[in-house]
Image (cartoon, grey):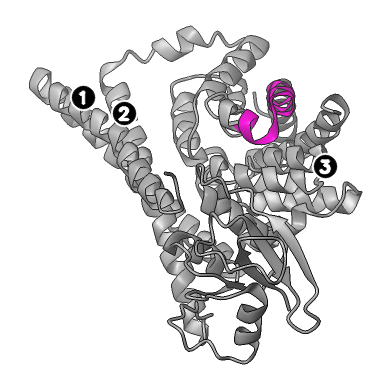
């Protein structure tokens, strides 16, 4: 019988799954060391170079995450999404999408429930579209692509999500 | 104030259900007036994520306290994260449980989640949570970085530019396709995107790739269809694909115009 306890089991299972990919990459490294030790050393140096370059941006990412976890609770986000399909509701849904964290599948049960309680399709679509904007990852993004590019991409992504909300609402009417 | 009580039936005289996550009903009671609302628990069948569904009901109804017989540690954690107290070990009817709670007579073994009672506790909690989030994304992130190292050392630098022709439309389409089938933390897409640029791939392709990575979820499509309906999920993802290409082209063209580069 499936009960609440399964969630903990599922967490452990997904934790193990996350190690499969890096484990496979390490195995390829093992093979590379045997076939071409020089190439493997080059690959490792290149990877550590990338990691070192990302240390400072990742430190900023952690700081932003702490602030968001300190001041934003999932309940705030849920309440944002519950407000009708007025322009205020759309803005709040966009904000909820931007500040939401964690994998999308963790949000599906919540979105399903909100939709059942009357949240409009447009709000759900706007929320999902705005999950593309990750404020806490901006330091990494800027370090790679520059401030102007990131600002433009963010602006167009938010605008695109609003368009998606409108179109989904029109096309997915039951 | 609102109290949610797990219940076997839909009235105040019903017995308190033993397990919060799979109780047939959640009775939302105002302890002052004893007005109540009986909500069928979507997770009552005990299928997957039963506990989460009851938690969602409690959060969306903005309750302050949950009274129940037993609540799993995971559900307690979710509720506590949302500022909801949990009192377990309750028996008798729903009305009796509420009365007991009001009189502070819950001398039965109770589990009450303490809200942070000093400023540092909230910060400690946020630090711990953020640390866990970083630790969770590290394995895949490190795997991606190690893979990029292998790619740079062993694969010809001409490979990527040979796939991405430099044609803005074609590159955008290819970048969107590639980003749509891959999924995961956006952090990984930035690292891969940065590497694509370094290898000579166009900004159109890279922008489409990182945009599609987060807005289109072909891997998660079955889960989205199950949660939000087939029609909604298919329309949203198809639209996102088109919009992803539009966003990428507009972003890059504006960037080139504003920065004066090409």
Residue A136: numbered disc? none
Residue A148 at x, y = what percent? 66, 42
| x and y percentages locating residue B192 in the rendered image | 45, 30
Magenta range: B224-241
Q: Tell me the tag on residue B147.
A: 2
- For residue B206, above or below residue A45: above
Q: Is residue B234 magenta?
A: yes
Tell me where residue B17 appears, x and y as whole percent: 55, 64
Tell if the residue under mark 2 belongs to the same chain as the one under mark 3.
no
**What is the distance, in whole Å, between disc 2 and disc 3 at their CAs?**
42 Å
Q: CA distance from mark 3 to mark 1?
A: 48 Å
- Residue at 71 percent of width and 20 percent of height: B238
Q: Looking at the image, is mark 3 or mark 1 nearer the viewer? A: 3
Q: Quadrant of residue B26?
A: bottom right
* Residue B173 x/y as whole percent: 63, 14
Q: Which residue is mark 1?
A: A28
Residue B164 versus residue B98 in the image, above or below: above
* Residue with the mark numbered 3: A120
Task: Report if residue A102 is visible in the image.
Answer: no
- In the rendered view, would you say A60 is above or below B168? below
Residue appearing at x 55%, y 91% in the figure: B105
């Amino acid at each position: 019988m499936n009960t609440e306890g399964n969630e903990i089991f599922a967490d452990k299972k997904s934790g193990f799954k996350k190690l499969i990919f890096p484990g496979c990459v390490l195995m390829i490294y093992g093979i590379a060391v045997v076939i071409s030790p020089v190439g493997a050393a080059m690959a490792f140096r290149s990877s550590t170079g990338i990691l070192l370059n990302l240390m400072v941006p990742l430190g900023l990412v952690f700081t932003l995450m702490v602030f968001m976890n300190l001041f934003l609770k999932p309940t705030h986000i849920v309440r944002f999404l519950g407000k009708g399909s007025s322009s205020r509701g759309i803005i709040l849904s966009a904000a909820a999408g931007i500040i939401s964290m964690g994998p999308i599948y963790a949000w599906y049960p919540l979105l399903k429930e909100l939709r059942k309680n009357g949240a409009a399709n447009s709000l759900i679509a706007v929320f999902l579209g705005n999950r593309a904007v990750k404020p806490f990852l901006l330091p990494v993004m800027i370090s790679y692509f520059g401030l102007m590019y990131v600002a433009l991409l963010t602006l167009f992504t938010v605008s695109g999500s609003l368009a998606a909300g409108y179109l989904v609402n029109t096309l997915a009417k039951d | 104030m609102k109290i949610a009580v797990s219940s076997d039936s839909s009235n105040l005289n019903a017995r308190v259900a033993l397990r919060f996550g799979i109780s047939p009903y959640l009775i939302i009671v105002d302890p002052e007036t004893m007005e109540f609302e009986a909500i069928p628990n979507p997770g009552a069948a005990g299928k997957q994520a039963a506990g989460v569904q009851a938690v969602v009901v409690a959060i969306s109804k903005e309750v302050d306290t949950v009274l129940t017989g037993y609540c799993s540690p995971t559900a307690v954690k979710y509720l506590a994260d949302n500022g909801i107290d949990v009192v377990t070990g309750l028996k008798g009817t729903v009305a009796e449980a509420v009365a007991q709670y009001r009189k502070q007579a819950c001398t039965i073994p109770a589990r009450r989640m303490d809200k942070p009672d000093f400023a540092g506790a909230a910060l400690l909690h946020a630090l711990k949570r953020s640390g866990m989030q970083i630790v969770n994304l590290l394995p895949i992130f490190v795997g991606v970085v190690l893979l990029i190292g292998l790619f740079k050392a062993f694969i010809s630098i001409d490979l990527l530019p040979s796939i991405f022709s430099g044609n803005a439309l074609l590159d955008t389409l290819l970048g969107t396709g590639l980003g749509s089938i891959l999924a995961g933390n956006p952090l990984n897409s930035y690292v891969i995107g940065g590497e694509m640029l370094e290898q000579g791939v166009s900004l159109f392709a890279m922008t489409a790739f990182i945009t599609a990575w987060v807005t289109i979820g072909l891997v998660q499509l079955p889960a989205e269809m199950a949660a939000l309906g087939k029609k909604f999920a298919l329309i949203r993802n198809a639209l996102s694909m088109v919009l992803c290409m539009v966003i990428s082209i507009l972003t890059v063209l504006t960037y080139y115009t504003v920065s004066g580069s090409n």
